[in-house]
Image (tube, rainbow, N blue to C red):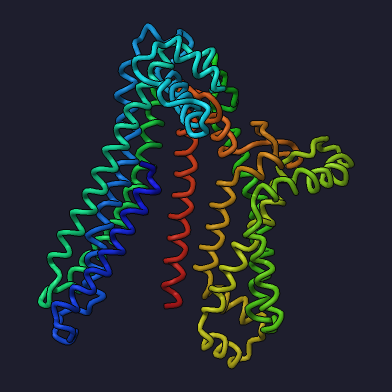
Amino acid sequence: MPVFWIVLIVLALGAAGYVVGRRGAVRSAGGDTRVLHSLPGYHGTNVFIYTAVPALLVLACWLLLQPMVIQSTIGGRIPDSAIPENSTRGLVMSDVRRMVGAIDAAVATGRLAEGRLASTVDVETLRTSLDEAGVPMAGAARPEVLETARAYRNLAGTGNMLMAVVVLGLAAGGLAFSIRRVGRDFRARNAVERGILALLILASTIAILTTAGIVASLVFETMEFFRMYPWQDFLFGLTWSPQFRGNSQLGMLPLLWGTLYVSFIALLVAVPVGLFAAIYMSEYASRRFRSVAKPLIEILAGIPTIVYGLFALVTVGPLLRDYFARPMGLGESSSSVMTAGLVMGIMLIPFVSSLSDDIINAVPQSLRDGSLGLGATKSETIRQVIVPAALPGIIGAILLAASRAIGETMIVVLGAGAAARLDLNPFEAMTTITVKIVGQLTGDTDFGSPETLVAFALGLTLFVITLALNILALYIVRKYREQYE
């Protein structure tokens, strides 16, 4: 049974349980709801929670764990002799998963009958059937891939069937249990509040565990990478030249330099423009102008980054090359750090402007009135009172923009190129850490090679940089808060 139908049935049972629970509460009170401990709506909500929430949680956990269990079970069945010399077990399992996806698509479209996939069908007949159905790779697939793909589908089908039985059975059991508890003296409101509190705690726990899981995956994979590649060469190497055939040079410094260089230029554009725009809109602009200008600036934040990348590639890059780089003898390429930095700075303006504007408007009016009452001009009040008072929030806005710049990929790909180099010339093509992370994890990758695992080391580097920025911003915020609170 498809997951969509399982969810729909569970929600339908929960909705029916809400109606039944509400009516049951009214019936138990003899029609006078004043004698109930809790309102009828609480009784219905309690039935809905017991019916839907545990079943949906089990469904989510099942969907998360089932692929891992199947892969670990099926992967062990592949003999070492069936793995080619230039491949690994992980790459064979990648072929198996792609084959399973292609078979499912062929079955769903009616090009392949389910009976042709039975375990009694030999491998050659299976290959012929898949080839006739137009399944990619079927004709050239190795026998162990076909057999493993069939076993994978069988296990997945059994698991999905068992999942439907368990989830729907749990929903039905929760419905029956909660309806039996409906009564005049049942404290449904307390039960609902405890259930909602448990859901809130679960949501917080999931957020914390997700963060911990991300960090743990980065750390463990990075440790595995450093077992294969010297950490000194990675941290202090000046050359980035990955070769999946061996003899790779995976020095991080050219990528780190490109990341910081592009981010610096972007902040050099976004921070002054965004901050001055925020000051003007909050302190000088009329209400009518502000109501028009602020939404127009915030539109920049909603433009997809691929559009910014195309703008950099088609317009800004050739413009900088023809009017600046070429006349000054600094380069002939339209892809450059300056191109990506300028376009990224335009993208970051609303992050700085909108947040700074809100923070400046939050400064108490008494500070403005006191400064003006002492004889300060409006500009002196802004420089010496308002901006220092709003500085913690402004630093937070700049930090958000810096994190956004460090993590940007598409603008760098189209605007700055993919050349990993150490150069001070802003009109030369360079690249960033995020671009190379995508490059190392794209296509058929062998997660047992340092050329792939280096992506996790690069990701951990970005995490450390962002963490350092947060610590610095927290220090600044605390320092200035002590002066104005």
Using the rendered image of the protein, determine whether residue 205 is visible from the camera's viewpoint: yes
Q: Which quadrant of the rendered structure holds the C terminus?
A: bottom left
Q: Position of residue 100 (x, y in %)?
A: 44, 26
Q: Which quadrant of the rendered structure holds the N terminus?
A: top left
Q: Is residue 11 above or below residue 139?
A: below
Q: Residue at x 45, y 65 (%)?
A: 477
Q: Residue at x 18, y 54 (%)?
A: 173
* Quarter of the view holding residue 226: top left
Left or right: 10, with 191 as reference point: right
* Quarter of the view holding residue 398: bottom right
Q: Residue at x 65, y 45 (%)?
A: 262
Q: Is residue 342 above or below residue 390?
A: above
Query: Outermost residue toward the bottom?
Result: 373
Q: In front: 80, or 174? A: 174
Q: Position of residue 110 (x, y in %)?
A: 51, 31
Query: Outermost residue toward the left?
Result: 185
Query: Outermost residue toward the right?
Result: 327
Q: Position of residue 155 (x, y in %)?
A: 32, 28
Q: Residue at x 70, y 73 (%)?
A: 293
Q: In front: 398, or 28? A: 28
Using the rendered image of the protein, determine whether residue 450 is visible from the camera's viewpoint: no
Left or right: 379, with 96 as reference point: right
